[in-house]
Amino acid sequence: MNALMWILGLIIALLAAINAICWGFAIREVGDPQLSLDFLFRLAFNKWYVLALASALVASFLSYVVLREMGVLAGRFFLSLGTIAMILACTLVLGEELTLKEWAGIALIMIGVILIGEW
């Protein structure tokens, strides 16, 4: 696999981490969901929510290149780097905790991505 796919994969992973962090801050600022106009306006105009949407949109556009080049099955698995980045961001920035089982899952995903990356 060429270097462009790895670069795009890492950029998409970074965007996934940014997305998770923005969601965490948006949830903290906006609060519990409610079926009210006040809640919808607070959410729609919250800077963290807007950044979460923007990062997801850019990651989706970049993912198209990876999926087109690698195929959907291999490309989606390769893009699991984003899941790892999201988990690490939530752990390090938002202070959420992982169990040993979740750390083992991260290790298995990394092994799979590395094996597919050599493909």
Image (cartoon, rainbow, N blue to C red):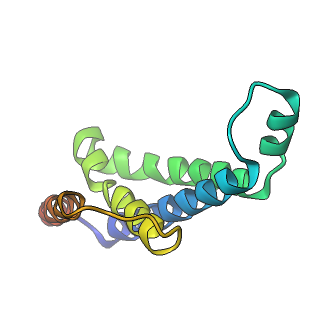
- Name the residue rendered at 24%, 58% in the picture: 102
Determine whether, in the image, residue 74 is placed left or right of residue 58.
left
Percent x, y for residue 28? 67, 56
- Name the residue rendered at 27%, 55% in the picture: 78
Percent x, y for residue 16? 48, 58
Where is 37 relative to 68, above or below?
above
Quadrant assignment for the N terminus? bottom left
In this rendered view, identify the residue nearer to me: 89 or 54.
89
In this rendered view, identify the residue nearer to me: 36 or 58.
36
Residue 54 seen in render: no
Quadrant assignment for the C terminus? bottom left
- Kindly indicate the quadrant of the structure image that contains residue 101: bottom left
How many numbered badges does the structure rendering display? Answer: 0
In this rendered view, identify the residue nearer to me: 36 or 80.
36
- Kindly indicate the quadrant of the structure image that contains residue 68: top left
- Name the residue rendered at 11%, 63% in the picture: 115
- Name the residue rendered at 36%, 56% in the picture: 83
Residue 95 seen in render: yes
Where is 103 relative to 33, above or below?
below
- Kindly indicate the quadrant of the structure image that contains residue 36: top right
Where is 33 relative to 26, above or below?
above
Determine whether, in the image, residue 3 is placed left or right of residue 100.
right
Percent x, y for residue 74? 22, 47
